[in-house]
Every structure is written in structure tokens, then in C-alpha cells.
Image (tube, helix red, strand yellow):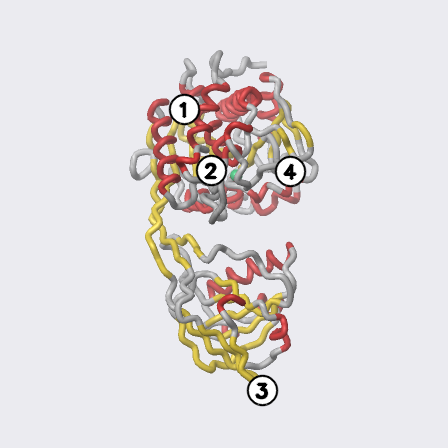
Amino acid sequence: MVAQAQLPPGAVTADALRAHVSFLASDALEGRNSPSKGLDIAAEYIASRFRATGLKPMGDDGYFQTADWTRSQVNPEGFVLALESAGKRYDIAYSDVTMDAAPATSLEGVAVVKLSMEEAAIAPDEAIRGKALLIGLPPIDRTVGQRFGALRRRLLKLSPAAAIFIAEGAVPPSRGGATLRSPADTPLLPIVVVRKPELATLTEAKLTLKLAAAIETPARMRNVAGLLEGTDLKDQVLIVSAHYDHLGLAASGKDVVFNGANDNASGVAGVLEVAASLAKLPTRPRRSILFLTFFAEEKGLLGARHYTLHPLVPLSQTIADLNFEQLGRTDSSEGANLDMVNMTGFDFSDVKTALAAAGALTGVRLVKHEKASDQFFGASDNLPFAEKCVVAHTVSVTYAFPDYHQLGDEWQKLDYDNMAKVVRMLGTGALFLADQASRPVYDAENAATANYRACHP
Ligand SMILES: [Zn+2]
């Protein structure tokens, strides 16, 4: 056995973690919505800590990787939606629809093409492009929700004149009426879900649709990136990441701040302290480590996706992403999770070997949650990396916990002593991965990893 490098003695204290989390999750940062002033302040704080640690700035603006996006907000002004069929006109009020931000639209008495979800999914492109579509939407469950998402992406590519979904039951949750869009995104499209099941039987109709253009405002958001340069393998990079955004403010109430202490000020605090500890080592790890924090995870992994489309180090040189989430709370909804770390996609790669070894050294168990391990693989910022065939996992202390996405996710409720142990374990694991002879690989025997191995032979 070769003696493995370890974190410096005294690395990662409960006090340091508490200091980071209590600031990032304070009411002053107003829940770090993407985009918001609170998000910007959090980014400045992270950059400031990277500066103190002496990491190399990797962004286009010091430590910041800038995303100049647009926020498009539904504009209900002058909304008209009507269907005429067999001499009857059905006017649909704005209060009876759920819709995304749309472009200015003016359709008057245009014949619709009626399709089922199945038909719309496989219809030839010409049957969709430029057409006014009327599509039946079955009651939403998980499968229908996924099919709706996939169909929505197809429609955005093919640009029908409009897509009117008639919900036959419960409707997908509102997307808040606003979308964050990058300059590379497809143009907006009038996609309207109508909550009028009685209209589901219409087979032919003429559509009238008047929509005002979405209200667009600039949305500048930033990932924060700092590099700890390695030694003999420094062109290869391990990413240690966490999202720093959260849900922002509630519309009304006594407490309106979604503080997001465990989700995910705790993961950011972990990144900051792993960086600070590894930077103090007398000998640098062999590979470089890129410390990365993301915007807009809560809006659909947008910051991580932005990174994988514009990587600061080639993804082919990126050996793995170790993504931190929910490191502070031990009160899992299933009982106490002390001295243990969960990992999504536990059996997907050999990253578990390095982390289990780090756990043995630091007194923390790496565990596999039978149900959640695979199920949550696609639920955090590791996913965009996996989809580009980079080995990527999210580690956390708990999956579900009582204040998840609630106003009560506050910094006082975290167990900082346990968290310090966990972060030492994760820092040691990162060090092992950066130092080990071979790069981690997805398990070729595991069918669940097929999509994540398809980019490389
Ligand atoms: Zn999270």
C-alpha cells in the first residue's frame, strides 16, 4: 500500500462551516433566487473566499463565468383565446390557462390539427411545423409529465404556429410564468394548457389566439470558478461543485425568505472548506481541482448546463464531478443520518472506491440508499456532466429532510460537528481521486449507465 496524502491536521472546522452557511442563508440574501441581488452577493462571497484561498481565477471576469441571459415573463395583456366548432364559440379566460412566456401572436380563425400526445410525439415534422395544434393532455402523472416535457422540447424545435393543450384532468404545475433563456435557446412559442376538460372532445375547430409579447428583462447570472493547480497530471481536472442559488422569496407571509441553508449553502460551505484545506497541503495533488459553484439549479440545473456547454477546462480532460448537496442536516425524513454520506448513482462508477477509502480514514460511512441512489442521479447538477459522459455524482448527508424547500430551512438547524467530519471525508476523497493512478470510469456492466457512456467508445 502506498501511503495516501491526507488533509492537513485541523482542516475543516465546524465554526468555519457555520460562518459560511449563516451568511449565505441569512435573510439579507433573500433566498438567492436566480437572478437576484442576493444571488450576486452570494457569488461575491464565494469569489472572495476563493481569493483568500489563492485559487486561480478561471472565469471570463475573474472568478465569474458570466451568463448574459434573458428573463421572459408571461404578459397577460389583451389575452384572447377562443375555439369555434360546429357554430359554437368557446371563449377561454386567462384564469383558465397555464402558459409559458410567449411571443406576440395574432391568429384569427385558423383551422387546428387535433392530435393526441402519442400522435404529436411521432407525427412527421411537416405535420407540426407552422400548424395550429390542439392536443389532448391526459391527467398528469410522472410518465405523462415526462412525455409532456419531451413533446414541449420537440415543439420548440419545430415551431408550430401555436400548441393548445386541452387538459383532461389535473394540469402540470405552473412554471411561474417566467423562463430564463440563454442566447442559444430556441425562440419562444405559444404553448397554452387549457383547464377545460369539456373541450377535450372537440375534433375540429378554428382557433383565435391573441398574445402580447413576453416581457423581457436582462438576466445576468454567474457561475464561480477557481482552480487549484495540480502537479504532474495538472492538465486533468477534478471538479468539486455545488449550487449556490435557492428559491428566493415567498409571495407573502410573516417569514418570506427561503433561506436554503441545507439546500444548498451547506454544499457551498463544503466546497469552500475543501478548497481551503487542500490549498494548505505541503504537496499539491497530482491533478488540478476546479472548484465550481452554480446558479439556477433550482430553475432546472441551468448553471451546470451552462458550464457543460461552455467548459472552462475541456470535458475530455475532466476526470469527474463530485457535486455537494445538503451536507448539514442529519435529520433525514427516515431517521438520523450521523457519520454517513449518501451518493447518487452509487453503483454507476468506481468513484465509490475512493470515497469509501476516504470514509474509512475519517470515520464516515459511504452508504447506498437502495431507492434514492439511482432515482436522484438525475435530480442535481451532476446530471449535465453525466449527459456529456463525465463521471459525475452528487453526495449528500440526507435525501429528503423535514424543511426541504420550505421557509424553515435555516442555518441554526444544521449539525456543524457532523458536517465538519463529512466535509473532511469528502475533501480526503477528492484528494484520493485527484491523486489516484487511473481516471474514474462508469461501470460498463451497469445498464443504467449506458447513456452516460455513449459519448466515448
Ligand atoms: Zn439543492
Q: Nearer the viewer, residue 129 or 50?
A: 50
Percent from the top left, x then y, of residue 284? 42, 19
Q: Nearer the viewer, residue 272 or 283?
A: 272
In this rendering, position of residue 183 left or right of residue 200? left
| Label 3: few (<14), some (14–19) or many (≥20) C-alpha neighbours in 10 Å | few
Secondary-structure class at tag 2: strand
Secondary-structure class at tag 4: helix
State how far apart marks 2 and 1 are (Cα): 24 Å
| Label 1: few (<14), some (14–19) or many (≥20) C-alpha neighbours in 10 Å | many
Q: Taking 387 as reference, is 443 above or below it?
A: above
Q: Quadrant of the C terminus?
A: top right
Cβ atoms at labels 2 and 4 below 8 Å apart: no
Three-letter amino acid code at the position of disc 1 = Gly
Q: Nearer the viewer, residue 70 or 447?
A: 70
Residue picked out by circle 1 = 230
Residue picked out by circle 4 = 373
Query: Which sits earlier in the primary sequence, circle 3 or circle 4?
Result: 3
Query: Which sits earlier in the primary sequence, circle 3 or circle 1?
Result: 3
Percent from the top left, x then y, of residue 67? 36, 46
Instruction: Single out the residue that lies furthest toward the bottom.
Output: 87
Mark in front: 2 vs 4: 2
Tell me if the residue at label 2 has its CB under 8 Å from ligand 1.
yes
Residue picked out by circle 3 = 86
Query: Which sits earlier in the primary sequence, circle 2 or circle 3?
Result: 3
* Residue drawn at point x = 47 percent, y = 13 percent: 8
Query: Which sits earlier in the primary sequence, circle 2 or circle 4?
Result: 2
* Residue drawn at point x = 58 percent, y = 25 percent: 355
